[in-house]
Image (cartoon, grey):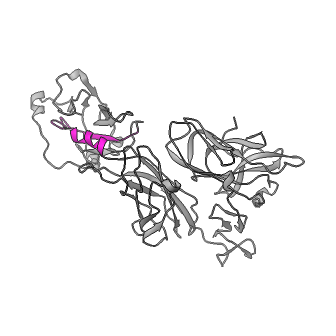
Amino acid sequence: GVCRDTASSATMRELHQRRFGAVLALAAILLALPITGAIECYDNIVWEDSDFPSAPDDAITCSNGDMCVGYVQPQDDGVTVNKATKCYNPTTMTTICKAVNETGLTTETFDDVEGVWAYSCCGQDFCNDNETYVDEANCLSEQPFIDELAVFENNNVQGASNDITVQFSFHATVDANKQIVIEGISGLDGPADSTTLAITVPGGSDKLLESTAEWSLNDGKLTVTTKREIMPNETVSVTFSGTNPSETQSKVSVTVTPPLIQAGCETRNVSKDDTILGVTFVNATCDDDNFFGDECTTRCYGVVVGAKCKCTSDLQFGADCNGTAVVNTAKSVAPTSVTKGKAFSLVSPDGSTLIEGSAESLKGSTVIEVKMLDYTDFEMPTTQKEFAAAGPIAIFLPHGLVFSSPVTIWLLVTNAAGSGKELRAAVFDPDTQTWELLTGVMVDGRMKAQTLHFSKFSTLSVPSATTTAAAATTAAA
């Protein structure tokens, strides 16, 4: 917006004649300099011809130290745009603008509003005088930007194979044969550089991406190519297998860069901070790191971390990870796109509903999959030997997906509870390697429960007095 300092004694005409031709200071420098008085942000701007407004009562007066952001945001109809100016504190401003007076594009979320924005930053008197927003508004209709981004992994075990999934969508159409760059996946021990790295893309014959990608290990960069036209808000999902760091590493931030369609519409990339690959290395307690246990005589078919054997595949089970399961495709749900703001219900090929969510459940559009395993004789953890399997394990993917409101899941039941026991829904905690019990109810021979996150679930037979331990779940409706 057009801004002025109400503490200034200069006349409006003198202020109106000021111009800014020098290279603008970075936001970090700006924050080191005190902003005196209150900045006024005008919200009656004519964006195509940003003349100085003549009506001071149309101004928004910010708090001392705050700055202004003028923005253009497309509306749901994809045609009209919302044009306004708001006040933001310096901390928030640094997530929007790198420099005072910066004009450009961003898909950052701020002030509880999501979406693609064209913006102009204002921290001094009349900083956007004679600014034009025609180009920025055109970019919003011509250039696709990342609208949502989510990143998942199936484990954080040192040196283990790890399935990394990146999901995102665009606010505008992306044509076929366009490259999308995913970077920041740093610290992996593998795979090696490749121009034809195999990736998993859902969709069968209607895949959104080609099935191979270019991968640079040192850069942690994956470049994928669109196979067909991607429509606005259509969720793109890509998964590839990497080898976790074999030493301690903090979580990394993953960035996605959309293809540049309209020249001059470059944008700061969209990132998810501190998401994956956070590894804490723990030496094996046994001299041979292939073995674990008090006597160091039990072989581990996963990865030994300290005194424990940790499984690294969804299909590995048992204290030594030597148990193997098979996916029952007739009772599973293939990867399916679900849209934020819409209720959803996913049904397996045999006609059984496995998950339902309300319009408020999703934090963002995503791709969901359910793997029902043909495996009911899995071994209980050493601290839960009184538990017994009463049904197969169901893996709800992607790992770690969190919901805004509980979703309802259904689990199979194959065994009776037994004397003095009851059937309970349970979720597996990969960090503690134990089962946490949920409150569920039996409905038509299946266990119905609710959860706020995805993981491995099953029906267990447990002693009747066992209490519920899972904090991140709610009772079944």
- Asked whether residue 74 is drawn in magenta, I would say no
Name the foreground residue: 251 vs 238.
Answer: 238
Instruction: Relative to 247, say whether 275 is above or below.
Output: above
Q: Please state if 338 lies on the left or on the right of 475 as rendered.
A: left
The range drawn in magenta is: 114-142
Outermost residue toward the front in this view: 205
Residue 107 in picture, x, y percent from top left: 36, 44
Q: Tell me if I can see residue 244 in this picture.
A: no
How many numbered badges does the structure rendering display? 0
The answer to whether residue 66 is left or right of residue 305 is: left
Q: Position of residue 40 (x, y in %)?
A: 24, 30
Answer with the quarter of the image where residue 473 lies.
top right
Q: Quadrant of the C terminus?
A: top right
Residue drawn where x is 29% and y is 36% of the image: 71
**Magenta stretch holds residue 124:** yes
Q: Quadrant of the N terminus?
A: top left
The residue lying toward the viewer, choosing from 433 and 283, is 433
Position of 168 relative to 127 (above/below): below
Query: Which residue is outermost to the bottom?
Result: 288
Q: Which x, y percent locates residue 343? A: 56, 36
Answer yes or no: is residue 107 visible. Answer: yes
Rendered position, 281 above or below 71: below
Q: Nearer the viewer, residue 370 or 474?
A: 370
Q: Where is residue 136 drawn, in percent x and y?
A: 25, 41
55 vs 471, left or right, is left
As drawn, 325 above or below 450? below
Q: At x 68% / y 46%, what residue is drawn?
A: 470
Residue at horizontal 24%, vertical 51%? 263
